[in-house]
Image (cartoon, coloured by chain):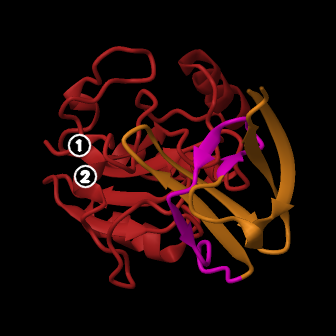
Chain colours: A red, B orange
């Protein structure tokens, strides 16, 4: 499966493929000290709204954007759960851009957004939607809110 | 060798300059994007090197922290 292969969770353990396999997955690079960090609220609401229908958010902490995710895994996990009540899984801190970018992001960033632009992740909270079959079906830039109609429509189209 | 830190206008930053983000992280500018997420009033400074990929945006008329290495005999 395109998402779970080789992914380690924020707790340092391999992410159980059953957490992601067969689900629609919204992959989001997150950061705790960004102006967009309140998007965690919308992401958690998506998780609550669609989680039982075969959907999950997958948060990917990343410190490549102005160093806005500097914390340890424990600090990141604590911040997400206590500040925003985030219940969705987080990976370990990853690089999403550059020559040391994670293989998952090599695949994700090959997909264009609605304007036809592929390539680098622009900033924190860029979103990629992966279908249950493992196809990358949509890309939303950071300014698109998690609960924007274009995101929810795309999720509803690919729910299993 | 002493390292001085000064602020410069974002518009004055050039390729090769060494900058420090508010987080304390540093980058050597290898690319300058003349807008940031569609905002023409911002520039984004990127280090895309073997060492790291790092991006730091700044308001065009704002200041950024600039690291200058001064050799001292």
Residue A75 is left or right of residue A53, and the answer is right
- Mark 2 element type: helix
Q: What label sits on residue A106 in the rendered view?
A: 2
- On the image, the x and y values in percent for residue B11 come to 75, 73
Q: Is residue B59 in view from this perspective?
A: no
A24 over A9 or under it: above or below: below
Q: Are marks 1 and 2 on the same chain?
A: yes
Instruction: State the residue in front, B9 or A129.
Output: B9
- On the image, the x and y values in percent for residue A159 come to 27, 58
Subunit of label 2: A
Q: Residue at x 18, y 34 (%)?
A: A5
Looking at the image, do the residues carrying marks 1 and 2 touch, with CB atoms under 8 Å apart?
yes
Question: Which stretch appears magenta?
Answer: B18-40
Q: Label 1 crowding class (10 Å Cα cut-off): few <14, some 14-19, many 20+?
A: some
Q: Is residue A62 magenta?
A: no
Circle 1 residue: A103
Q: Is residue A80 in view from this perspective?
A: yes
Residue A9 is left or right of residue A88, and the answer is left
Residue A58 is left or right of residue B12, and the answer is left
């Amino acid at each position: 499966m395109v998402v779970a292969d080789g992914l380690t969770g924020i707790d340092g353990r391999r992410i159980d493929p059953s957490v992601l396999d067969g689900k629609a997955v919204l992959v989001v690079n997150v950061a705790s000290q960004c102006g967009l960090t309140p998007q965690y609220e919308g992401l958690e609401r998506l998780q609550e709204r669609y989680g039982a229908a075969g959907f999950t958010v997958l948060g990917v902490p990343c410190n490549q954007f102005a160093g806005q995710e500097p914390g340890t895994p424990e600090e990141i996990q604590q911040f997400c759960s206590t500040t925003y009540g985030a219940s969705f899984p987080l990976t370990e801190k990853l690089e999403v851009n550059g020559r040391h970018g994670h293989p998952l992001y090599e695949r994700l960033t090959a997909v264009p957004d609605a304007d036809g632009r592929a390539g680098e992740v622009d900033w924190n909270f860029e979103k990629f939607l992966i279908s249950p079959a493992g196809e990358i079906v949509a890309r939303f830039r950071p300014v698109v809110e998690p609960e924007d109609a274009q995101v929810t429509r795309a999720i509803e189209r690919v729910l299993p | 060798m002493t390292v001085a830190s000064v602020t410069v206008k974002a518009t004055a930053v050039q390729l090769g300059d060494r900058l420090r983000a508010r987080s304390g992280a540093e980058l050597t500018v290898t690319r300058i994007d003349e807008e940031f997420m569609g905002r023409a009033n911002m520039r984004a400074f990127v280090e895309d090197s073997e060492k790291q990929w790092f991006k730091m945006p700044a308001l065009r008329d704002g200041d950024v922290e600039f690291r200058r290495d001064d050799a001292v005999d």
